[in-house]
Image: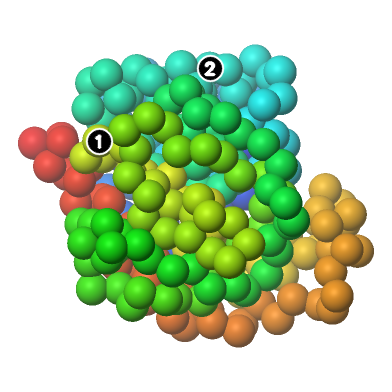
Amino acid sequence: MRVLAFRHIPFESGGLIVPALAQRGISIQYVDLYRRDSEMPDPADAAGLIFLGGPMSANDDLAYLKREAAAIVQAVDREQPVLGVCLGAQLAARALGARVYRNHRKEIGWFDIHLTADGAADPLFAGVSRTETVFHWHGETFDLPQGAVLLASSDACRHQAFRFGEGVYGLQFHLEVTPEIIADWCSQDENSADVRELDGPIDPHVNAARLEELSNRVFGRWADLALRRAE
């Protein structure tokens, strides 16, 4: 069994999503539509769809982003689980009719998120502390799609996580990153402008152990959704 994970830049990966799914016998097939020679597998054949992050905007007039947005809408129509992370969450929100726009400030580094009452009762986040320190790297945000449920907020960005229906999740923050991934992002040319704006260097290890625990729980439960859908 497999899920499709849509990447937008070479240094993005599923990170801690991969082992959480592997524990349930689910593999990840990466789809790189930003590459001109890449082909789109049939999304309907997958147990679920994952849309990862990237430095571009969900508002950019890019053909591959339009194809991904169409894939999200089609997945919703067939009640297929969808997980959007950072840019992927913004793509999902936009595909579902919401607005994506610049946040009042960038949120890069380790910051707290606060679960709403709905978030604390959500199947993915139930049992998670109402406040958790997680990793962020974004300059844009989104409105909630009509009918979506707000699951988490932060002091700098109100819409940090949402659920649409029973199986579509958007996470503005990064539960999937390891210290190695964070260090690599900080070294990438595409991120150099963001890094120069920071008050100091990012410590990749600040809350890495807890983040791994959270990712195993949250992504594992999303994998369970994909398993139920496949059955």
Q: Which residue is mark 1?
A: 165
Q: Amino acid at mark 1?
A: Gly
What residue do we see at 82% from left, 48% from top?
190
What residue do we see at 49% from left, 68% from top?
113
Q: Residues within 10 Å of mark 2 (few under 14, many from 20)?
A: few
Residue 64 in which image quadrant: top right
What residue do we see at 89% from left, 54% from top?
193
Q: Is residue 103 left or right of residue 194?
A: left
Q: Which residue is mark 2?
A: 67
What residue do we see at 21% from left, 62% from top?
121
Nearest to the observer: residue 145 or residue 38? 145
Nearest to the observer: residue 187 or residue 129? 129
Residue extending furthest toward the left: 231
Relative to 88, residue 181 above or below:
below
Relative to 228, residue 79 above or below:
above
Spot occupied by residue 195 in the image (x, y as percentages of width and height): 84, 63
Spot occupied by residue 101 in the image (x, y as percentages of width and height): 67, 36
Nearest to the observer: residue 229 or residue 28? 229
Instruction: Looking at the image, tell me whether mark 1 or mark 2 is earlier in sequence order.
Output: 2
Relative to 212, residue 35 above or below:
above
Q: Residues within 10 Å of mark 1 (few under 14, many from 20)?
A: few
Q: Amino acid at mark 2?
A: Arg
Mark 1 vs mark 2, foreground winner is 1
Distance (Cα) linking label 1 and label 2: 22 Å
What secondary structure is marked by label 1?
A: loop
